[in-house]
Image (cartoon, helix red, strand yellow):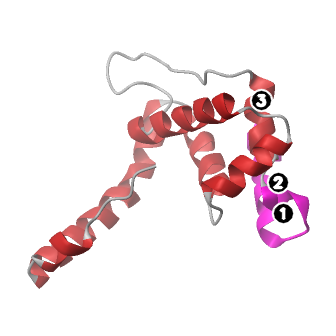
Amino acid sequence: MQNLEFAEPWKHLTDKERNYAYYMAKASWAGARMVLHQLAYEAPPLFVIFQAYFAGTDFENLFASAEKSGVTADEWKNFLAYVGGFYGNLSNYHSFGDLKFVPQLEADKFKGILYSHPALEGDSEEGKTLRGVLDELFP
């Protein structure tokens, strides 16, 4: 994982440039949800599943939970590659040529990763929300 260093460059922007960058980013993210519906019928549910899965938990905890459920490091990397590709294209189709991409792991491993989330172990509100999302949207 790579963190972006933005603190120093941000200092060199004027208040007007900072506001422009901030509100442009917010508008882009808000408008992105419309794109999901235009690209593939499965894109909106995948987006909701990934947003719920990655909310509030760091990658190390997610990997540790997935590993406990029998997922290998390579399978985890393939899962993250798929999710990264999904977010990068805002769909499960490449941004060129109408070419669909699929995860490079078995369907049961993909589902196992999602259902291994640490929040699902307890009775937390986050766990209830995630389970509801997965149970309703995951095929």
| The one of 98 and 37 positioned closer to us in this rendering | 98
Q: Amino acid at mark 2?
A: Arg
Judging by the rendered image, the residue that carries numbered circle 2 is: 131
Instruction: Point out residue 48 in the picture as x, y percentages from the top left corner.
Output: 61, 50
Helix, strand, or loop for circle 2? helix
Image x and y of residue 57, in percent: 65, 62
Instruction: State which mark lies toward you, 1 or 3.
Output: 3
The span from disc 3 to disc 2 (Cα, nearest Å) is 17 Å
Which circle marks residue 101 in the picture? none
Q: Is 101 positioned to the left or the right of 111 in the image?
A: left
Asked whether disc 1 touches disc 2, contact meaning CB atoms under 8 Å apart, the reply is yes
Q: Please report the residue visible at 89 percent of the width from the left and 59 percent of the height from the top.
A: 121
In the rendered structure, the answer to whether residue 119 lies left or right of residue 99 reads right
Label 1: state its secondary structure.
helix
Residue 109: image tag: 3
**Is 21 contained in the magenta span?**
no
Q: Secondary structure at mark 3?
A: helix
Rendered image quadrant of residue 59 = bottom right
Q: Which residues are magenta?
A: 118-139
Note whether 77 is above or below 98 in the view shown.
below
Residue 4 visible (yes or no): yes
- Does residue 23 sit above or below 88 in this rendering? below
Residue 138 percent across, percent down from the top left: 75, 38
Q: Report whether 72 appears left or right of 21.
A: right
